[in-house]
Every structure is written in structure tokens, then in C-alpha cells.
Amino acid sequence: MSIKDGDTIKIDYTGKLDDGSVFDSSEQHGEPLEFTVGANQVISGFEEAVRGMDEGDEKEFRIEPSEAYGEYNENLTQQVPKDIIQSNMDIEEGMMILVRTPDGREMPAKVAEVGDEQLTLDMNHPLAGKALNFNIRVVEA
């Protein structure tokens, strides 16, 4: 019976960027990924790719940014004064930190640049603007 919306499935997967680097895999997590198809628990392009597959099937596919984490948005970068970051650690370029939005929510941000007085924070998802290439195998359907 082919996979359809509402089915809970388990898959082994490896996700790679166009340069061949692995950004995630079920092997890294030590177990297959389990999710319910159609419940928006994974990115939409991933759900679309598994529909119609059967247990034991393997597939390679590519998800464009629009069906994954969206296009990179320059408007989601912001310069902030260094002194508003309350931390007892040295802030370094490339670090992920939690920032509080004006409405009180916390969200992760990457430190894109460290200046003398300011930090440039990037609040895009780390995979925004990137096409994702997957190799999957349905373990349980």
C-alpha cells in the first residue's frame, strides 16, 4: 500500500548540499526519522517526495529552497549594539545565540560579523537559500 497523508512512516535519509557536504542524516541521530505524512512535521518538499512510495523503496530527490527553508532574506540580518547581548562568553563570528524579539519570543540568530561596537545578526534559517538533496529509504510504512 503506497504512502499517503495520515500515514506514520520511518525513513533512513542522508541530506546533502549541492557541494556534496552532508547537512543531516538519520545515521547522525542513531535512528530512522519518524513522521506523519501531511502533518507538517517535515518540510513540504520532503512530504511530497515520500507520497506514493512503499516500504523498502529508495529514492533520490532534490528540494528547491522554496519547498525547503525559503530563499535567503537580507532583511533578516540586523546590526545591534554589542552591549545589548547579555553573555559572559566572548561572542565570535559563526556562533548561534538566542535573541529576544520585541514581543518577548526567543529565536536563534547566527553572529554574521563582530565589529568593535556592533554585531551583525543573521536570523535566516541556516539552510535558507539552499537546495537540499536527499537519498532516502522507507524503513517502515
Image (cartoon, rainbow, N blue to C red):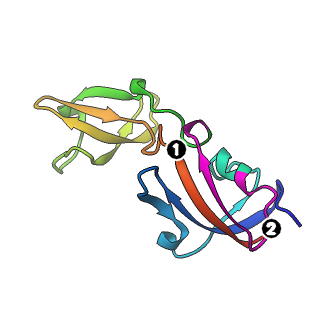
The residue range painted magenta reads 49-66
Residue located beneath label 1 in the image: 131
- x 67%, y 69%: residue: 137
- 65 and 121: which one is in front? 65
Is residue 56 within the magenta segment?
yes
Q: Is residue 101 depicted above or below 18 in this figure? A: above
Query: Where residue 81 sits in the image (x, y, percent)?
Result: 21, 28
Q: Is residue 33 magenta?
A: no
Circle 2 residues within 10 Å: few <14, some 14–19, many ≥20? some
Residue displayed at 50% across by 70% down: 29
Which residue is at 19% across, 46% downward? 92
* Residue at 19% from the left image edge and 45% from the top image edge: 91
Q: Nearer the viewer, residue 92 or 105?
A: 92
Number of labelled discs? Answer: 2
**Amino acid tagged 1:** Ala
Which of the image's four quarters has the N terminus?
Answer: bottom right
- Give the spatial CA distance, label 2 vs label 1: 25 Å
- Give residue 30's mark: none
The label number, if any, that marks residue 54 in the structure image: 2
Residue 74 screen position, x and y as percent = 39, 26
* Residue type at numbered disc 2: Asp
